[in-house]
Amino acid sequence: MDEFDAEALAAGLETFGGDEAERRAVARHARDLADSGRYVEDADVELTPEHVVVQLADAPEGSPAERWNWWLGALEFAYGGYAEFQLRRWKSE
């Protein structure tokens, strides 16, 4: 697996609004999830920036962090072990 491109994800998250700090925080958490290997092990799908954006687009509404936490909640329910990757706070600009 190639290294997860957090900058590409942060750019892709612009479609969901939020400020740059929020998008960077989500991208860092996504990189941590990718680095853990947990998602590919559970879902048998490589975690890429594009895949994350597609998954977050399924969320009913919200900012990047709200969408990220919604998706992680679904993964937690389905597989367990994803709560540690949820975003609790970030420093806004």
Image (cartoon, rainbow, N blue to C red):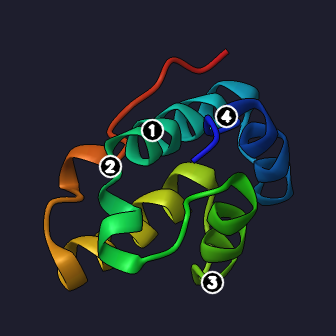
- Amino acid type at circle 2 is Gln
Q: Quadrant of the C terminus?
A: top right
Helix, strand or loop for disc 3: loop
Secondary structure category for the residue under label 4: helix
Q: Nearer the viewer, residue 76 or 16?
A: 76
Reading the chain from its start, which is encountered first: label 2 or label 3? 3
Whether residues under marks 1 and 3 lie with C-beta atoms below 8 angstroms apart, the answer is no
Disc on res. 6: 4
Residue under numbered circle 1 = 29
Crowd around label 4: few <14 · some 14–19 · many ≥20 (10 Å):
many
For marks 4 and 2, give the CA distance.
Answer: 16 Å
CA distance separating discs 1 and 3: 19 Å
User: Which is nearer the N-term, disc 4 or disc 2?
Assistant: 4
Measured as percent of width and height from the top left, residue 30 is found at 50, 45
Image point (41%, 36%), residue name: 32
* Residue that appears at 63% across and 56% down: 63
Q: CA distance from mark 4 to mark 1?
A: 9 Å
> Which dot, 4 or 2, sits closer to the camera?
4
**Mark 3 highlights which residue?**
58
Outermost residue, front side = 1
Which amino acid is tagged 4? Answer: Ala
Q: Which residue position is annotated with label 2?
A: 86
Q: Position of residue 55 (x, y in %)?
A: 61, 75
Lower sequence index among marks 3 and 4 = 4
Outermost residue, left side: 80
Q: Amino acid at mark 3?
A: Asp
- Which quadrant of the structure image shows residue 38? bottom left
- Residues at marks 2 and 1, CA–CA distance in whole angstroms: 7 Å
Q: Mark 2 touching mark 3, by CB under 8 A?
A: no
From mark 2 to mark 3, how far is it between C-alphas?
Answer: 17 Å
Image point 73% across, 45% down: which residue? 9
